[in-house]
Image (cartoon, helix red, strand yellow):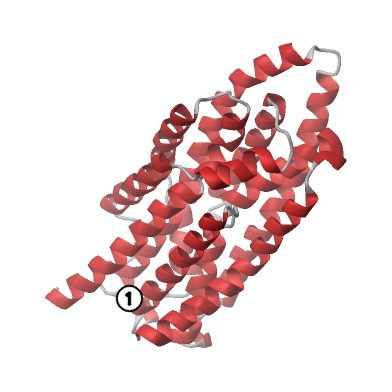
Amino acid sequence: MDTSSIFVIGIVIFLALAFDFINGFHDTANAIATSVSTRALKPRTAIILAAAMNFLGAILFTGVAKKIGGSVTDPTTLDNGLEVVTATLLAAIIWNLATWWLGIPSSSSHALIGALAGAVFVGAGSDHLKWSGFIEIVEGLLLSPLIAFVIGYIIMTILKWIFAKKSPHTVNKGFRTMQILTAAAQSFTHGTNDAQKAMGIITFALVTSGHLESLEVPLWVKIAAATSMALGTSIGGWKIIKTMGTKIFKIEPIHGFAADFTSASVIFGATLLHLPVSTTHAVTSAILGVGSAKRFSEVKWSLAGRIVITWFITIPISAILAGIIFKILF
């Protein structure tokens, strides 16, 4: 391995871990927005819990990483794979930081998949894109929020029926405790899915550069990605927490429990199927579904519409941005 190769690989790994770090504080809201807004957990406690469970989830699963690493393109066929990965990560990082600054809960997953497709298209040509794999991933990304909305609506409707005759104080006290468990589950599932994306990209880079023979994720990559996401999570994304926890509708403990249980179930189900999904979309859609079941008119649909628009534009904008970055740099 020559010095220049080591240097380029080092840059790619740094960018991938930076993406994971940004993903951590960008998506902290996914796990703790509802539990913080209902005061089930203090902010500092919630962030520590989220960081620890994110790390654990990231270490234990790799199926999504392999999917990311090989479904959009075949890394062994790219002559300029490291350049493609560099453009991909820069575009995804730029989009994540922009939406974080604006307080919009956009999808890191959409950003990464869109950027990878755009970088491959511009850098290697459309023949190198695995359209079937790309479409399968996009379908999962688009279907998961719809599923989360429906399940959230159903679960909240059932809870309303079960606890209709209980006093609000008693119900909220019980569910405030339950929210600690669902926040932990939410953080764990975030690690099982979102942290895998940086692992997949690093493994992709190692394969395309000839330093690995297969998409099996090395242990050091697992530990590095899990640690990076946990550190990012420990910083927290307060702007997005405020948006998701307070601005969509007034969340009480029973709603927070229903939303977290729903999104954690959807995300973990996707992880078991090795499908990369957007935890941001799953959580936000679950909150919208729960809010609709509580009272449709209480949901601030104008804000929800703004979030949905961001969901749809993230993939094409990230793809275009990655293509432009590739042209400028390489």
174 up-or-down from 202: above or below? above
Residue in the picture at 35% in, 86% down: 330
Count of numbered circles in the view = 1
Q: Is residue 216 visible?
A: no
Does 212 sit left or right of 47 as displayed? left
Residue in the picture at 50% in, 25% down: 42
Q: Amino acid at mark 1?
A: Leu
Does 116 sit left or right of 33 as displayed? left
Reading the image, the residue beneath label 1 is 82
Which image quadrant for residue 308? Answer: bottom right
Q: Residues within 10 Å of mark 1 (few under 14, many from 20)?
A: many
Q: What element does badge 1 sit on? A: helix
Q: Is residue 9 visible?
A: yes
The foreground one among 42 and 272 is: 42
Residue 33 in the image: state x and y as whole percent.
58, 37
The foreground one among 299 and 209 is: 299
Which image quadrant for residue 307? Answer: bottom right
Residue in the picture at 48% in, 81% down: 323
Residue 229 in the image: state x and y as whole percent.
39, 47
* Image quarter of the N terminus: bottom left
Residue in the picture at 64% in, 48% down: 282
